[in-house]
């Protein structure tokens, strides 16, 4: 019902299209358009052969499509919609690899006079904004944080929570990206599978800009994160002077690494939230 309420009356090239549904006794069915290339999770996490399909141009267009979808639901429609579960497995791809944002089951509607909603925490560990996880206060900047993590994943080919074979331990992609940024080695985070498809200095600059944008979106203070319309302009460099990300001061990212830091709501919502939070980053 939440999904139907959110997207039944809206349409965008980068949102999955809902054709219909059925609510009859125990039956709950939603019918969506068929998307031939499954999810971005399958493409990026399905081995090197699959990742090689996505050139830098393809990844750039996918990232832009997701940004357009979020800018649309955050700022262009009323009431606004906050998705709450932005992750690779919720980005579906059509036959032309056009991205479609899907799974609005956790989404919330925001009317004009609302600055935030207080709600039980839901989402996936590694993607959840720290201020939302700790306080339960949901804003559009919560989705911006998740998009930042997603952007880092798209460029790096790594998961939000990855495993370092040499260190023999898990690490959070956001933290690794920050450490590389501080050491001025951020380009080393680029997916090795991209090296053959980066053919110009302009494309190398785009890769670096997108990585920095990812870090800009996951800053600890939510007020410092840009709105999605601003993110889109910076991705496209619509105003080179205003949107030169290389001249911006990026602050330390926020990160939730301990499940005990997550706000406990009422018994029912907290139970659902903990199931969501403890599930693997790309489990559907």
Image (cartoon, rainbow, N blue to C red):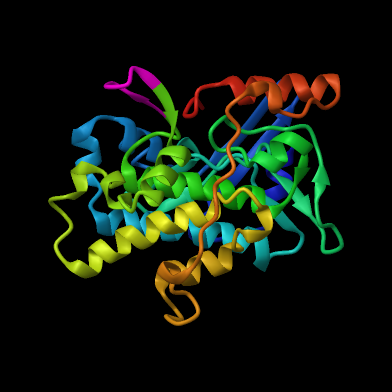
Counting from the top left corner in percent of width and height, residue 96 is at 31, 53
Nearer to me, 79 or 270: 270
Report whether 22 appears left or right of 241.
Answer: right
Could you tell me which residue is drawn at 28 percent across and 21 percent down? 165
Q: Is residue 229 visible?
A: yes
**Res 132 → quadrant:** top right
Report whether 229 appears left or right of 210.
Answer: right
Give yes or no for residue 166 being in the magenta stretch.
Answer: yes
Report whether 257 appears left or right of 121.
Answer: left
Q: Tell me the magenta residue range.
A: 162-169
Counting from the top left corner in percent of width and height, residue 10 is at 64, 58
Relative height, residue 30 to residue 163 (above, below):
below
Counting from the top left corner in percent of width and height, residue 229 is at 57, 68
Could you tell me which residue is drawn at 50 percent across and 79 percent down? 242
Relative height, residue 12 to residue 117 (above, below):
below
Give yes or no for residue 149 being in the magenta stretch.
Answer: no
């Amino acid at each position: 019902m939440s999904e139907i309420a959110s997207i039944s009356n809206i349409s965008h090239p980068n949102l999955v299209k809902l054709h219909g549904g059925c609510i009859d006794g125990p039956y709950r069915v939603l019918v969506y358009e068929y998307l031939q290339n499954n999810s971005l999770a399958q493409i990026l996490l399905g081995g090197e052969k699959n990742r090689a399909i996505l050139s830098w141009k393809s990844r750039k267009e996918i990232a832009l499509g997701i940004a357009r979808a979020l800018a649309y639901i955050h700022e262009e429609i009323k009431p606004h919609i906050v998705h709450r579960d932005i992750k690779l497995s919720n980005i579906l791809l059509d036959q032309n690899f056009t991205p479609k944002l899907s799974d609005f089951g956790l989404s919330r509607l925001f009317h004009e006079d609302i600055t935030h909603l207080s709600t039980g925490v839901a989402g996936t560990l590694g993607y959840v904004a720290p201020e939302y996880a700790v306080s339960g206060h949901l804003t559009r900047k919560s989705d911006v944080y998740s998009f930042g993590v997603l952007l880092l994943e798209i460029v790096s080919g790594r998961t939000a929570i990855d495993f370092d074979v040499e260190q023999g331990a898990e690490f959070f992609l956001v933290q690794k990206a920050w450490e590389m940024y501080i050491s001025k080695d951020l380009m080393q985070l680029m997916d090795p599978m991209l090296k053959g498809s980066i053919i110009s200095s302009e494309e190398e600059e785009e890769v670096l800009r997108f990585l920095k944008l990812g870090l800009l979106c996951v800053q600890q203070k939510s007020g410092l994160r840009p709105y999605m319309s601003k993110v889109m302009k910076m991705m496209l460099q619509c105003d080179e002077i205003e949107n030169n990300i290389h001249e911006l001061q990026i602050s330390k990212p926020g990160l939730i690494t301990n499940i005990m830091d997550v706000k406990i709501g009422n018994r029912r919502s907290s139970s659902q939230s903990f199931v969501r939070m403890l599930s693997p980053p790309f489990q559907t």
